[in-house]
Image (spheres, grey):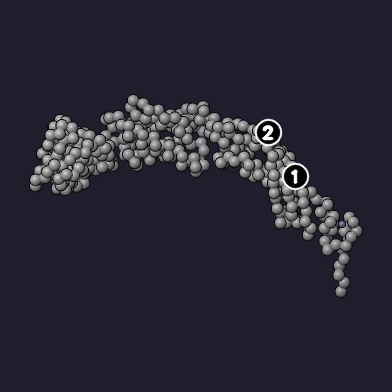
Amino acid sequence: MTIQENFCPKCGGKTENEGLCNTCLRSDIEWLTCEPRLPCVICPTCGSIKKVNTWTDVPYDRQKLSEELAFGAVSAHVDVQDLELAISTREISPNRTQCTVYVRGILYGEPVYKTCETLIVWTKENCDRCSRLSGGYYASTIQVRATGRRPDTFERERAVKIAYDIEESVQQLGERLSFITRIDDTRDGVDIVVSSHSIGDTITRQIITEMGGKATRHPKLIGEQDGKKVYRITILLRLPEFRKGDVIMFNKRYYEVKGTDSGLIRVFDLIEGRSNVLHEHDSGFRLIGNVREAERADVTYTDNDIAGILDPVSYDIKEVKAHAWLRLSPHEKVKILRDHEEEEIILVG
Ligand SMILES: [Zn+2]
Ligand SMILES: [Zn+2]
């Protein structure tokens, strides 16, 4: 039995390999390559970074990004094992970073070392989002209106807050081209102008979930792009006639509105002290005010089902029905609204 002995065809030395010996292999291959120049495009407005024609939002930290780019510039041969990289960077000008990458590993049984130099060239370019934003690009307009009235300040602010919260969350999810182009406060309501149909629909759904109402979509063809029809959509969102907390009179009774769904007004009966529903299409509702605007008044005395309330404006004592659900007791505060038509004080809680 003989052991097969191999000889290296290059240096003639003994080897266990089928071809070149390890020493010749090591000197024969370019085990490390390195890109000398790395262009990196950054949006000067929002700090997004362009990677192969695609913009992405990454928190811009020049040092970290330099390291990441420089590591990415280095590629080692597949036979290098236990590869270790270290880096030092030097800012040579506002748009140039010189990087030295120190590389070591094991190649065919022996340690190898090398350093490589790479230059990062920073360039500035407005990203897709910032150029759309500065160009006033939009795809949908949500017109926030109300039924039979104008949205009040509270509703306007709430709708705007919902819109910004949604913009924030979709941006975080990486939908970088979904943003609010602008918001116009108009006499009749608020116009929320947005850059994509999807964010427009999401904002609309959320406003309706939180504030009630309904929406209709009106698309308008504005052209074609890459063979696809491009639409702009106007969404008319009508908030319900009555807001949450509105106190209304219906059939000589007072109710506090708790919400509206599909034609029904959920109310709290301010006499009986229990929940009920009214039908939106009924007529004869009269709006008194909203519990958010209620005044606070002192209960001066109670006598069975009668209570004396100190009017905080006129300082007169007014006698009212002390409905059982209110559980009034003297020297406590109670919230009141005024029905100017009936010259009555309504206890709302
Ligand atoms: Zn050899
Ligand atoms: Zn940008």
Identify which residue, 8 or 102, lies in the foreground: 102
Lateral position of residue 321 relative to residue 246, left or right: left
Residue at 65 percent across and 44 percent down: it is 67
- Of all residues, the one furthest to the top in this rendering is 187
Identify which residue, 136 or 95, lies in the foreground: 95
Q: Which of the 4 image quadrants contains residue 23?
A: bottom right
Lateral position of residue 185 relative to residue 312, left or right: right
User: In the picture shown, does residue 272 fall above or below 196?
Assistant: below
**Residue 170 x %, y %:** 47, 41
Q: Which residue is the site of mark 2?
A: 93
**Residue 286 x %, y %:** 19, 33
Residue at 56 percent across and 41 percent down: it is 59
Using the rendered image of the protein, determine whether residue 5 is visible from the camera's viewpoint.
Answer: yes
Q: Which residue is the site of mark 1?
A: 116
Which quadrant is the C terminus positioned in?
A: top left
User: In the picture shown, does residue 29 fall above or below 187?
Assistant: below
Which circle, 1 or 2, is nearer the viewer?
2
Residue at 70 percent across and 35 percent down: it is 92
Q: Indicate the amino acid at tag 1.
A: Cys
Q: Indicate the amino acid at tag 2.
A: Ser
N-terminal of the pair, mark 1 or mark 2, is 2
Check mark 2 vs ligand 2: CB closer than 8 Å? yes or no. Answer: no
Using the rendered image of the protein, determine whether residue 201 is visible from the camera's viewpoint.
Answer: no
Which quadrant is the N terminus positioned in?
A: bottom right
Query: Which type of secondary structure does the marked residue at label 2 adopt?
Result: strand
User: In the picture shown, does residue 251 fall above or below 15?
Assistant: above
Q: CA distance from mark 1 to mark 2?
A: 20 Å
